[in-house]
Structure formats: C-alpha cells, structure tokens
Amino acid sequence: METSDAILTRRSVHKVTDRVPERRTIERLLEAAVRAPTHHLTQPWRFVVLAGEERDRLGRAWARGVERAGKDSSGIVAKVRRAPVIVCVIERPKLHLPKVVEIEEHHATGAALQNILLTAHDLGLGAMLRTGPACSMPEVREVLGVEDDELVAGFVYLGYPQEGAEERPMTRRIAAAELTEWRGL
Ligand SMILES: Cc1cc2nc3c(=O)[nH]c(=O)nc-3n(C[C@H](O)[C@H](O)[C@H](O)COP(=O)(O)O)c2cc1C
C-alpha cells in the first residue's frame, strides 16, 4: 500500500475478531512506532502489550478505578475484551534533559501512535486508539507499572477487522482547503 493511500484510507476499527495477531506482526507495529520523529532523540515512549488474561488484569484495575469514583463498573471488564490485543503506549517525557520541551514529547508520542495505526492498517489489521479516564487512574497505572514521570498516552486496541468494517463510511473532516491560508504560493 502506498503511504499516502494508507493515510487516506485509515480508519478506527471498532469491531475486530478474536483472532490474535502474531507477535511478529505486533513487533512490526512497534518498530514503526519508534521511527517517529523525536526532537533531541528523546524517544519518550515504551510499550506494554496485553493479550488474553492480561487484558482482564487491566480491566479489573480499570473497574476498581471506576468504583473508587463512585460509578458503576459493570461492563468495564468487557471493554478490554473488545480486541484480542491492547498495546499500551507509555510516554516518558525527558524533561530533565536540557532543551526538551514538554509539548514536543507529546508530539513525538502522537506520531508514534499514528505510526502504529498506519502500519496496522497497512498489514490488514484493525486498530483503534482509546484514551479516557483509565489513562490516569492510579489502579491502571499500577497494573501497567507506570512510573511517576510517565503517562499512559493511549491504548491501541488491535485485531483483525470484522467483516463489513470497510463498509462503514469514513468519518468526516473539514476540508484542508477550508483550513488553509496560502501565502506566497
Ligand atoms: C488522542 C486520541 C484519543 C482517542 N480516544 C478515543 C476513545 O477513548 N474512545 C473512542 O471511541 N475513540 C477514541 N479516539 C478515536 C477517535 O474517536 C477517532 O479517531 C475519530 O472518531 C475519527 O475516526 P477515524 O479514526 O476513523 O478517522 C481517540 C483518538 C485520539 C487521537
């Protein structure tokens, strides 16, 4: 697939089958992730890949966080079973280094996330980036082994698309032309 085609046809895939992607396939996504641009080569990322029962451990931690907030946690564990693999992308902004700017660390991690999504699409996988309150719950951070100077940047739910995934219309965007001011060209 051409890179530009991959970018233009990528979509979030909500529904995937139970088929577990092979470890080598997931490694390719992570190899793509670490090729993201990174100012000062800080490489502010690491990954925790969860499959099988390990997803449930995440789900139980998430449910405890929801309960602590006084909310109904039924259905939370089912959420982590929406895909056979969850790639947790952990960001460690290297703010102790000279010249490192926090927002640039977030940019780099966002680029790494997009590399994962695009490579998944290129390899025929279905991927969906999810964030939400679970990212900052102490219960979730603990189960993932997230250190104090780290953030959970997002959870990439990964699997093979269910039949018909391609038929859903692409989400809409404001045309770039409407958002662009041309100067000198
Ligand atoms: C930083 C980030 C966090 C996201 N978190 C969620 C989420 O928690 N739940 C969700 O359903 N989608 C989440 N999404 C996916 C967006 O909903 C999705 O990208 C958007 O609807 C556009 O659809 P598309 O990816 O198919 O183009 C997230 C996307 C980004 C960039």
Image: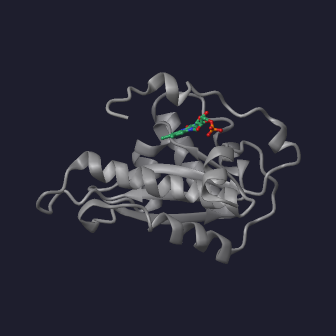
Which quadrant of the picture is home to ligand 1? Answer: top right
Single out the residue that lies furthest toward the front.
Answer: 185
- Residue 180 seen anywhere in this rendered image of the structure: yes
Quarter of the image with the N terminus in it: bottom right
**Colour logic:** one colour
Query: Residue 84: horizontal and vertical position, in percent?
Result: 72, 58
Q: Residue furthest top?
A: 178
Q: Measured from the top left, where is residue 33 in percent x and y? A: 49, 64
Q: Residue at x 23, y 60 (%)?
A: 94
Which residue is at 27% across, 65% downward? 42
**Looking at the rendering, which quadrant does residue 168 occupy?**
top right
| Quarter of image, res 135 | top left
Is 6 or 185 nearer to us in this picture?
A: 185
Percent x, y for residue 113? Answer: 50, 54
Q: Is residue 39 left or right of residue 8?
A: left
Q: Is residue 129 left or right of residue 91?
A: right
Picture layout, residue 158 above or below residue 30: above
Depth check: give the residue in front, 55 or 159: 159
For residue 171, above or below residue 47:
above
Question: What residue occupies the far right of the structure in this picture?
Answer: 163
For image coordinates 44% across by 68% down, the residue present is 34
Instruction: Confirm whether residue 77 shows in the render.
Output: no
Answer with left or right where residue 78 lies relative to residue 183.
right
Q: Horizontal and vertical percent for residue 185?
A: 38, 35
